[in-house]
Image (cartoon, rainbow, N blue to C red):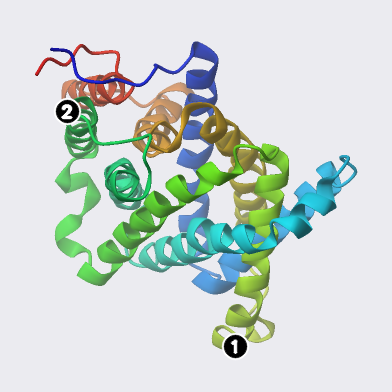
């Protein structure tokens, strides 16, 4: 008997997911550059505050924009906490000690947490054989793709790795919680949660980092912060909430499996890097995992 399956994502939704993978693939690089000069909480504040201001300027004239923000402020505050403030801080703190590659593979555990959280807190996205197999294949592909030697796992402190895993757990909760915004425009949801997370991070950054005492960062770092805020956050979240409203929590969380291969493919296209046979096998496992999670593989009981 065939397992109970949800409908597969449309090609247009897959296109948005792949685009998001490339955008967030670059975010780990930008963060790694910036966090060497800017403390994690201050970097989070810059990221969310600049992104929020950009979205307010872009979408603030939409009919009912601020009325919706005011009526849903409690939910947006929770979303800003678990989808921005907590995970961004944990990832940036971890990236003070680990590289972008290791951070991205640890972040790729998000679909696992999203499946587990959805099993407990939702009624329409229960664990299936296909989802479990898909998560396992995807994570195996990540390990094969990047490789222990390239990641420098032996040299990385445990707390830094656990911090990034903690961010993935927070994202898992955010994926399910974000489903309550299906009736809200993705532009409003993105703006609201980034505004809320800015309000959360402002006092924390002022008390912990005292940013007025910091030196002005170099121009490349300022560029990385702007790219992190405007491209990898403001624009990316509009795309993310669009995918979330169309395809659901588990499917939206697949983007974390696309981030590391997206970074490698960007290197091939723009830097002339090559793809080894091991990396090609890793990409193949990820593709199988995505197909399984999207229920395009027939899973028999």
Instruction: Name the residue: 20% across, 54% down.
Output: 152
Instruction: Write down the residue under mark 2.
Output: 129
Q: Judge whether residue 219 can be spotted in this image.
A: no
| Alpha carbons under labels 2 and 1: distance apart | 47 Å
Instruction: Name the residue: 37% across, 31% down.
Output: 264
The answer to whether marks 2 and 1 mark residues whose Cβ atoms lie closer than 8 Å is no
Q: Mark number for residue 103?
A: none
Above or below, comparing residue 294 to residue 193 in the picture: above
Above or below, comparing residue 240 to residue 193 in the picture: above
Instruction: Name the residue: 26% across, 62% down.
Output: 161
Secondary structure type for disc 2:
helix
Please state which of residues 272 and 255 is positioned toward the viewer in this rendering. Answer: 255
Q: Earlier in the sequence, mark 2 or mark 1?
A: 2
Instruction: Name the residue: 40% across, 38% down.
Output: 253
Instruction: Write down the residue under mark 1.
Output: 207
Residue 233 x, y percent position in the rendering? 61, 47
Q: Judge whether residue 215 can be spotted in this image.
A: yes
* Image quadrant where one finds the C terminus: top left
Residue 93 x, y percent position in the rendering? 41, 68
Residue 292 x, y percent position in the rendering? 25, 21
Residue 88 x, y percent position in the rendering? 49, 60
Label 1 crowding class (10 Å Cα cut-off): few <14, some 14-19, many 20+?
few
């Amino acid at each position: 008997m065939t397992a109970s399956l949800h409908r597969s994502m449309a090609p247009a939704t897959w296109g948005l997911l792949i685009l998001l993978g490339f955008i967030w693939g670059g975010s780990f690089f930008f963060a790694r550059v910036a966090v060497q000069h800017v403390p994690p909480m201050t970097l989070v504040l810059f990221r969310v505050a600049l992104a929020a201001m950009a979205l307010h300027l872009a979408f603030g004239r939409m009919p009912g924009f601020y009325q919706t923000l005011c009526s849903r402020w409690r939910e947006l505050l929770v979303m800003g906490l678990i989808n921005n403030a907590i995970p961004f801080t944990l990832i940036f703190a971890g990236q003070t000690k680990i590289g972008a590659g290791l951070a991205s593979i640890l972040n790729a555990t998000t679909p696992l947490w999203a499946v587990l959280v959805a099993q407990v807190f939702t009624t329409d996205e229960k664990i299936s054989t296909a989802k479990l197999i898909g998560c396992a294949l995807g994570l195996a592909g990540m390990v094969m793709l990047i490789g222990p030697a390239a990641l420098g796992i032996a040299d990385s402190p445990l707390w830094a790795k656990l911090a990034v895993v903690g961010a993935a757990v927070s994202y898992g909760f955010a994926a399910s919680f974000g489903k309550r915004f299906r009736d809200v425009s993705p532009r409003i949801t993105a703006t609201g949660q980034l505004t809320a997370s800015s309000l959360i991070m402002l006092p924390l950054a002022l008390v912990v980092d005292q940013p007025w005492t910091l030196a002005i960062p170099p121009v490349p770092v300022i560029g990385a912060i702007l790219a992190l805020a405007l491209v990898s956050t403001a624009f990316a979240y509009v795309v993310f909430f669009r995918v979330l409203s169309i395809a659901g929590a588990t499917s939206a969380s697949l983007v974390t499996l696309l981030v590391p291969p997206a970074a490698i493919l960007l290197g091939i296209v723009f830097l002339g890097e090559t793809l080894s046979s091991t990396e090609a096998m890793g990409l193949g496992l990820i593709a199988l995992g995505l197909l399984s999670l999207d229920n395009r593989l027939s899973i028999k009981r």
